[in-house]
C-alpha cells in the first residue's frame, strides 16, 4: 500500500517539473526590449554584430544571450537589466534606443568613440544605478533630466567633451555615491547643492574650466557628510582654503593642484582625521605649513611646489599622479 501511494507522488513531481520547465522555456523577452536592442545593434555597426547572434538579445532556444547583455525574469517575461558594450571602438552618436530599456540598472558604454549629446530621454531609465560613458567623445551640455535617475549610485562622464555648467539637478540624486566629471569643458561654478548628497563619497571635477572658491562650494551647513575624495585640480579656482573645510571629517584625498588659489594653509586642515593625500602644488599659497601636518598619522603625500611658501617648507612623500580606476568604485 505504501508503494502504491508513492507512485502517484513521483508522477506528480515529474509533471510539475515538466510544467515549470515549459514555463521557463517559453518565457519570452519583452518585445519592447527586443526592438530596442535590435535598433542598438543596427546603430552600433559590425563591431558588435559578430557577438550578437539571433533576434532575441536574451537568448532563444540554443542561442545564448548577446554578449554584454544581462536579462532577468519579471513575471511572464524576460527584460534587459544590464548592457555593457565597452572598449570596442563603437563610432557614432549615443544610441537613443537605449532609453527604451526601462528596466536597465547598469549601462556601460565606456572607452568607445561615441559622439553627440547625451539625450534628454536618459531620464526615462528610472531603475538605473550605474551609468558609465567615460572615455568617449560625447559633447554638449548634460541634460537636466539626468536628475530624474533617483536610484543612480555611480555616474561616470569623465574624458568627454561636455560643456556648459555642471547641472544642479545632480543634487536630486539621493543615492549618488561616485560622481566623475573629470576632463571635460565644464564652466561656471560647482553647484554647492551637491553638498546635500548624503551618500556622496567621491567628487571629481578636475581638468575643466571651473571658477569660484571652495568657500562657496561648502557654504551649506552640514555639507558633504561622507565625502572621502575631492578632486578640484586643474581649474581656475581662486580664494583660499577655508578653515571650515576641516568639517569634512571623512576626507582622505584633497586635490587642489593647478588652480589660482591664495592665502595660508589653515591649521585646522591638519586635523582631518583620515587625510592621506594633499595636493597644493601650482597655486599661489603663501606662509608656512603648520607642524601638525608633518605629525599627521595618515598623511602620506603632501605636495607644495610652485607656490609662494616661505623658504624651508618641505613636501611629504614622493610625488606621483594619483589615478583611480572604475574598478575602485564599481559594485
Image (cartoon, helix red, strand yellow):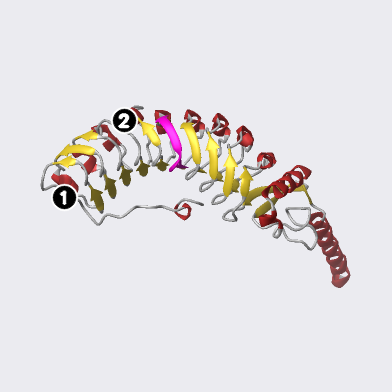
Horizontal arrangement in the rendering, residue 309 relative to residue 30 (left or right): left
Cβ atoms under marks 1 and 2 closer than 8 Å: no
Left or right: 328 with respect to 258? right
Q: Is mark 1 on a helix, strand or loop?
A: loop
Please report the residue visible at 23 percent of the width from the left and 55 percent of the height from the top: 317
Query: Could you tell me if residue 175 is visible in this image?
Result: no
> Based on the displayed image, in which of its 4 quarters is residue 265 positioned?
top left
Query: Magenta includes 187?
Result: yes
| Bounds of the magenta segment | 179-188
Q: Can you tell which quarter of the image residue 186 is in?
A: top left
Question: Split into 4 quadrants, where in the image is the N terminus?
Answer: bottom right
Image disc number at residue 213: 2
Q: What is the number of callouts on the image?
A: 2
- The dot on residue 314 is 1
Is 10 drawn above or below residue 79 in the view shown? below
Q: Earlier in the sequence, mark 1 or mark 2?
A: 2
315 w.r.t. 117: above or below: below
Question: Predominant secondary structure in magenta?
Answer: strand
Amino acid at each position: 500500500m505504501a508503494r502504491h501511494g508513492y507512485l502517484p507522488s513521483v508522477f506528480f513531481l515529474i509533471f510539475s517539473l515538466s510544467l515549470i520547465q515549459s514555463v521557463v522555456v517559453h518565457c519570452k523577452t519583452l518585445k519592447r526590449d527586443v526592438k530596442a536592442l535590435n535598433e542598438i545593434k543596427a546603430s552600433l555597426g559590425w563591431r558588435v554584430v559578430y557577438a550578437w547572434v539571433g533576434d532575441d538579445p536574451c537568448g532563444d532556444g540554443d542561442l545564448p544571450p548577446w554578449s554584454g547583455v544581462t536579462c532577468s525574469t519579471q513575471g511572464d517575461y524576460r527584460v534587459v537589466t544590464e548592457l555593457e558594450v565597452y572598449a570596442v571602438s563603437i563610432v557614432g552618436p549615443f544610441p537613443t534606443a537605449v532609453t527604451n530599456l526601462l528596466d536597465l540598472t547598469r549601462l556601460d558604454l565606456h572607452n568607445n568613440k561615441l559622439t553627440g549629446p547625451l539625450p534628454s530621454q536618459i531620464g526615462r531609465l528610472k531603475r538605473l544605478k550605474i551609468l558609465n560613458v567615460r572615455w568617449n567623445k560625447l559633447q554638449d551640455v548634460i541634460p537636466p533630466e539626468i536628475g530624474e535617475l533617483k536610484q543612480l549610485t555611480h555616474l561616470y562622464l569623465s574624458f568627454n567633451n561636455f560643456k556648459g555648467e555642471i547641472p544642479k539637478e545632480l543634487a536630486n540624486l539621493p543615492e549618488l555615491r561616485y560622481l566623475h566629471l573629470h576632463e571635460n569643458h565644464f564652466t561656471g561654478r560647482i553647484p554647492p547643492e551637491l553638498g546635500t548628497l548624503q551618500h556622496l563619497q567621491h567628487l571629481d571635477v578636475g581638468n575643466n574650466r571651473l571658477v569660484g572658491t571652495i568657500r562657496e562650494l561648502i557654504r551649506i551647513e552640514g555639507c558633504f557628510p561622507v565625502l572621502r575624495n575631492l578632486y578640484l585640480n586643474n581649474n581656475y579656482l581662486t580664494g583660499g582654503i577655508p578653515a571650515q573645510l576641516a568639517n569634512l571629517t571623512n576626507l582622505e584625498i584633497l586635490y587642489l593642484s593647478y588652480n589660482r588659489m591664495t592665502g595660508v594653509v589653515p591649521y585646522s586642515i591638519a586635523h582631518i582625521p583620515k587625510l592621506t593625500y594633499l595636493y597644493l602644488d601650482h597655486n599661489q599659497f603663501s606662509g608656512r605649513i603648520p607642524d601638525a601636518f608633518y605629525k599627521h598619522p595618515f598623511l602620506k603625500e603632501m605636495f607644495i611646489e610652485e607656490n609662494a611658501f616661505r623658504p624651508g617648507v618641505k613636501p611629504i612623500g614622493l610625488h606621483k599622479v594619483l589615478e583611480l580606476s572604475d574598478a575602485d568604485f564599481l559594485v
